[in-house]
Amino acid sequence: MEQTISIEKRIKEIFADDPLYLVIKETPTEQFFLSEPYLSNLIEKKYYSTPEVASWFNVTDAQIRYYIKPFEEYLFDGEASNPTTASVIRLDFKAVLKLRMILLLKDEYRVKGLKQLLRINKDGHIIKKRTPSSTEVGMPDNIEYRLNAMSQALEQIMKTGLFKMEQDEETEQMQLSLNYDFFKQEIKALPPEPSQGLEEIQEATKKLEQENAELKKKVEEIMASNKEDIAIRIREKAIEQIVLSRLQNEAVQQYSQQIKATLFQKLFRSAQLEVDKKLYIAAYIEEKFSKQLTQALLEYHEQSLSYQDE
């Protein structure tokens, strides 16, 4: 048991910044990856043959070689000391684990998608990230805290449905704007006579507009000072919120079609309707969120790589 805990910590330490490990991190796949039986036989300073590794992963030697070919630079890190020949391939500790992550993700991402995650170009080489110069502003130490705070604030705003996030075609920056279509639909659903509910919605809208202005200011400040990696993480957070907002709006619309009640009745006359609505929305998002988020992030990274190739 001590050995399992030790190797698990070692794997997390080695692959903390690995693109594939970041994909499976904090998912059920991560726990499977860190607890497979073959890990008890894995030694860090030893090399293993492809047939031996294939037996661990319950695949054929041909399959192992098939997935080694397009990812050689990633698997071997360009190490000249690796005892690999034209006919015999030897995998060290890190290469075995990297290959295992490739096999775990191959069905979902395919070879093309995995190459994009690893920033591997058409020639099979990994595109190196730009090294910041000494004159550039350093990354803030509390960026993770700030990103989480922004994400939570953005999530609260997007949950109202009164706002939508769009990408400016010229600057490629994300901007928040009022969702007038949704707003008009909700207003039409209100009773024709003046009501306390309408006044409360108007007050809430003003408050959200103020929060939106403050949030936009914070986003602009951070995006102006952060590096390429932070910009990507912010974009990924924004994509996550866009997907979440879209699914929430879809769920609200479907629920509204099923429940023939006015907005006034839903908000102020029936606590049970509100509970049912929340349960319906939560179930809808849980069913579709993971797949749609993965697809949205994949499209974003494909677009980013195409810009770099140009």
Image: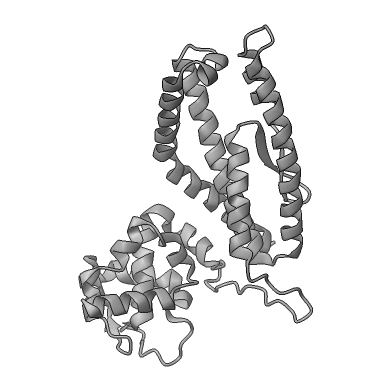
Q: Position of residue 94 (x, y in %)?
A: 38, 79
Q: Residue furthest top?
A: 193
Q: Position of residue 30 (x, y in %)?
A: 35, 62
Q: Is residue 11 left or right of residue 78?
A: left
Identify the residue shown where x is 57% and y is 44%: 241
Task: Identify whether 281 is placed above or below 27.
Answer: above
Q: Position of residue 235 (x, y in %)?
A: 63, 54
Q: Quadrant of residue 154?
A: top right
Quadrant in the picture for the C terminus: bottom right
- Front residue (pair 165, 96): 165
Question: How many numbered marks have been drawn onto this rendered protein structure?
Answer: 0
Identify the residue shown where x is 32% and y is 86%: 44
Q: Position of residue 176 (x, y in %)?
A: 71, 41
Identify the residue shown where x is 33% and y is 56%: 28
Q: Residue furthest front?
A: 196
- Front residue (pair 207, 17): 207
Q: Quadrant of residue 10?
A: bottom left
